[in-house]
Image (cartoon, rainbow, N blue to C red):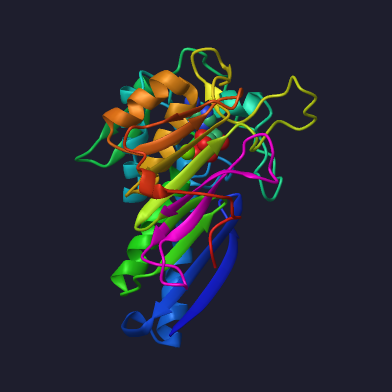
Amino acid sequence: MTDAYVRTIASMGTVVTIHVVGHGANRVDETGRKRGVDAALAWFDEVERSCSRFDPRSEVSQLSTRIGARVPVSDLLFEAVRFALAVAEESGGAFDPTVGLLLETRGFNREYRSGAVVRTALEPDDDATYRDVHLDADERTIMLARPLVLDLGAVAKGLAIDMAARELRGRSFADFAIDAGGDLYLAGRNADGKPWSVGVRHPRDHQTLFETLRVSNVAVCTSGDYERRTPGDDGGAEHHIMDPRTRVSASTAASVTVLASSAMVADALGTAAFVLGPERGLELLERDGVDGVIITPALERFATRGMRAEYLVEGRSSGFDS
Ligand code: AMP
Ligand code: MG
């Protein structure tokens, strides 16, 4: 016998849903289930408080008010930035968490859900890169060596998903789905006792799915050029994934979906592969041992060798099973 419990909140500029399935012996009692899901969801607000560039009080925003100073930060922010810098290094700077001011000046200056406008009182320094972010692992400090704004939009959601999944597992939940605006972690089995079914959206026709995957105990994160475009899009407008080398939106991919055991890894590598484009993006995913599918604007499909056949399901269904 199975039963399910679903809760949704608004956080991190999107809608976050946790769906817990109880299968026989794995079932957590009702109070424990509610507490567990609340504790898991609380991680989203917690990560946002540290990592959101849209909140002037967040830790990450505070760093930009203290350029040149070694600022002590929380473990959450430290780990998010450390990981983002590693991906920046690995992608040769295609991924670069210092794109905050560039995004702000390009019109991405509103919190996606509330619409609150941010305006950072810094003169943009076009030469600033991830190399200007200095970490001290012993002191747990971050120092910005040039005027810049860190944008952790490509890692923070994944980090929050990982923390939420860890919270649930630590409380003996085995079967659950975490959905943060289409970035997912799927644990165990769905209500039918089967692996979870995840749809990869068609990047140009949102009524249909490009393909459907069957997955278990894995994160599935997607970056798409159809998400978060500048307002007043008339064809010349931009979307939210910047190529730091050209300083305009990356244009050689339409969407990238990455599967990895960590959502933070899937989230960031998907964004990195998006900027690198199909050939070099695929190389990056292969090198890092994660699976992924890159769909180009011309709708060509590039998949990693490890994109195993067992993931793929014939036919088309919608979303993931409930
Ligand atoms: P995702 O939604 O995971 O594809 O990540 C996109 C988000 O990452 C954007 O909304 C920005 O917050 C941030 N971002 C944009 N361009 C880059 C880049 N080149 N490197 C790192 N992060 C980026
Ligand atoms: Mg991403």
**Where's the N terminus, which quadrant?**
bottom left
Residue visible at 34% across and 26% down in the picture: 284
Front residue of 270/322: it is 322
Q: Position of residue 26 (x, y in %)?
A: 33, 80
Q: Is residue 282 above or below residue 245?
A: below
How many marks do you count on the picture?
0
Is residue 273 at all visible to an observer of this figure? yes
Q: Position of residue 30 (x, y in %)?
A: 45, 86
Q: Is residue 291 above or below residue 279?
A: below
The furthest residue to the front: 314
Residue 247: quadrant of the picture: top right
Residue visible at 40% across and 62% down in the picture: 195
Front residue of 12/236: it is 236
**Where's the C terminus, which quadrant?**
bottom right
In the image, taking residue 181 as reference, residue 1 lies left or right, namely left
Determine if the magenta segment contains residue 200: yes
Q: Position of residue 44 (x, y in %)?
A: 48, 57
Front residue of 220/190: it is 190
Residue 172: quadrant of the picture: bottom left
The furthest residue to the left: 138
| Residue stretch in magenta | 186-214
Is residue 44 at all visible to an observer of this figure? no
Determine if the magenta segment contains residue 218: no
Q: Position of residue 179 (x, y in %)?
A: 52, 57
Residue visible at 58% across and 20% down in the picture: 251
